[in-house]
């Protein structure tokens, strides 16, 4: 299984991220599995939120610069590298196992889905000196169509804790070698089988009729239901990075594959990734740029919009006249309620395209003739409306400026109002 070491320090079991299968191929603790099982240990992982339409979704997956550039990305909750923990059973019971830390030695860099790990210590960090039991290695190029195959592995629980997962024992499934698949790997190909392969089986050994491992359980086709098995011979190149392991494996029967144009490998060293803070800084920059672009476009859209003041009489709105420099001058007490004025936002025949107004009302300071914040409010509306009225109480004498913005902060328009004493 793979764990987030930092979350695991906070609470045991909290760092559990997923499970796969694998098999030991040398007595000193080298083992084979799929690349996709341990890829987050090398390339890193991302826990992030993204938009699916208007709904925000969450995903945990492989770290990717492409994802960071995706415009649906809204937040990165965490980035990091997981660590592989190997569960080795030495008996038939649910508790007959030991846990070991491992390191990723090499992974496939092409379309071949293989990886090689090395057990480095026990769960307490102590060196491991025991000899492990290994599986016999066969030749995947010699597997014939129609031959019986056996898939061995540890299907993952759909829900549950790390503790539950550790107690979930292995399964086997039987089928035949149905043929070769060159769609997903056109150069090397997969062995196809009707044996069941489920999440968690990935990386598990596939045995031939001779009871030798001829492949690695890799995937199940969603469209056909056929299981895909990576031929064990492909691990010849994955293991070649470590000369010690490679020599042992050749002695144990690992064979050079006949077709290998697509098989490349790279060391399992952790790759440099952005921290959570760096990733979110990129998102914030992108969102700010997108917002600025939207504001610029909408302010152009609102270039003919008007804001003016009115009063409602007999169910109809009566617009107040605008005087010099666009200033509307009224006496306090105008209307039925002292200072209660209707503000109109009018975009002509075009929809306002916003679900709410952000209204900032400033008041002129006669000492320095500058406007300062007086009050603010939010007005909800139908975004298809072209004209909207809302009320505001101008109780105090003085000169006011009303700025109306859309939900992104684009200025729709503004107007000024002067409240004079009610004399006569």
Image (spheres, rainbow, N blue to C red):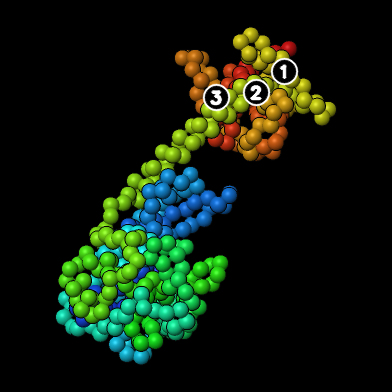
- Residue 257 drawn above or below residue 329: below
Direction from residue 89 to residue 160 in the image, left or right:
right
Which sits in the foreground, 164 or 175?
A: 175
- Residue 422 drawn above or below residue 92: above
- Tag 2 and tag 1, C-beta contact below 8 Å: no
| Residue 173 % position (x, y) | 46, 83
Q: Which residue is mark 1?
A: 320
- Is residue 404 shown to the viewer in this render? yes
Question: Does dot 2 land on a helix, a strand or a loop?
Answer: loop
Residue at 45% x, 79% y: name it. 145
Instruction: Give how far apart the Cα atoms at labels 2 and 1 are.
Output: 17 Å
Closer to the eye: label 2 or 3? 2
Quadrant in which the C terminus is drawn: top right
Quarter holding residue 245? bottom left
- Is residue 40 shown to the viewer in this render? no
* Comes first in the chain, label 2 or label 1: 2
Q: Residue furthest top?
A: 324
| Residue 339 % position (x, y) | 67, 25
Question: Does dot 1 land on a helix, a strand or a loop?
Answer: loop
Residue at 64% x, 34% y: name it. 353
Which sits in the foreground, 51 or 224?
A: 224
- Residue 156 drawn above or below residue 383: below
| Residue 346 % position (x, y) | 69, 25
* Comes first in the chain, label 2 or label 3: 2
Numbered mark located on residue 362 in the image: 3
Give the crowd class for mark 1: few <14, some 14-19, many >=20 residues within 10 Å. Answer: some
Quarter holding residue 410? top right
Numbered mark located on residue 305 in the image: 2
Direction from residue 236 to residue 372 in the image, left or right:
right
Residue at 31% x, 70% y: name it. 257
Which sits in the foreground, 259 or 401?
A: 259
């Amino acid at each position: 299984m793979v764990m987030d070491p930092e979350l695991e320090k906070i609470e045991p079991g909290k760092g559990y991220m997923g499970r796969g299968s694998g098999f030991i191929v040398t007595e000193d603790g080298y083992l084979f599995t799929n690349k996709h099982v341990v890829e987050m240990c090398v390339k890193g992982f991302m826990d992030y939120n993204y938009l699916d339409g208007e709904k925000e979704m969450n995903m945990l997956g492989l770290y990717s610069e492409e994802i960071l550039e995706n415009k649906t990305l809204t937040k990165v909750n965490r980035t990091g590298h997981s660590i592989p923990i190997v569960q080795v059973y030495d008996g038939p019971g649910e508790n007959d196992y030991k846990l070991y830390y491992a390191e990723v030695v090499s992974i496939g860099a092409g379309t071949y889905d293989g990886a090689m790990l090395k057990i480095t210590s026990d769960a307490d960090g102590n060196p491991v000196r025991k000899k492990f039991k290994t599986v016999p290695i066969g030749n995947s190029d010699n597997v014939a169509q129609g031959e019986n195959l056996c898939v061995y592995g540890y299907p993952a629980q759909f829900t549950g804790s790390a503790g539950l997962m550790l107690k979930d024992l292995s399964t086997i499934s039987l089928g035949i070698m149905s043929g070769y698949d060159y769609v997903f790997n056109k150069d090397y190909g997969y062995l196809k089988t009707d044996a069941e392969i489920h999440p968690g089986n990935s990386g598990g050994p596939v045995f031939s009729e001779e009871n030798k491992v001829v492949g690695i359980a890799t995937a199940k086709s969603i469209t056909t239901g056929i299981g895909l098995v990576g031929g064990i011979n492909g691990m010849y190149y994955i293991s070649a990075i470590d000369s010690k392991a490679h020599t042992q494996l050749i002695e144990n029967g690992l064979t050079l594959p006949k077709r290998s144009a697509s098989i490349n490998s790279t060391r399992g060293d952790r790759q440099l990734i952005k921290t959570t803070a760096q990733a979110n800084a990129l998102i914030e920059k992108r969102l700010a740029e997108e917002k600025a672009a939207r504001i610029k476009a909408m302010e152009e859209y609102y270039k003919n919009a008007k804001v003016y003041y009115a009063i409602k009489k007999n169910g109809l709105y009566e617009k107040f006249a605008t005087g010099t420099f666009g200033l509307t001058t009224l006496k306090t007490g105008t209307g039925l309620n002292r200072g209660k004025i209707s503000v109109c936002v009018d975009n002509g025949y075009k929809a306002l395209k916003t679900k709410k107004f952000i209204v900032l009302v400033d008041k002129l300071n006669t000492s320095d003739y500058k406007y300062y914040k007086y009050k603010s409010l939010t007005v909800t509306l139908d975004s298809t409306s072209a004209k909207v009225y809302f009320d505001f109480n101008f109780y105090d004498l003085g000169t006011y400026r009303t700025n109306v913005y859309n939900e992104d902060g684009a200025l729709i328009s503004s107007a000024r109002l002067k409240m004079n004493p009610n004399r006569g």
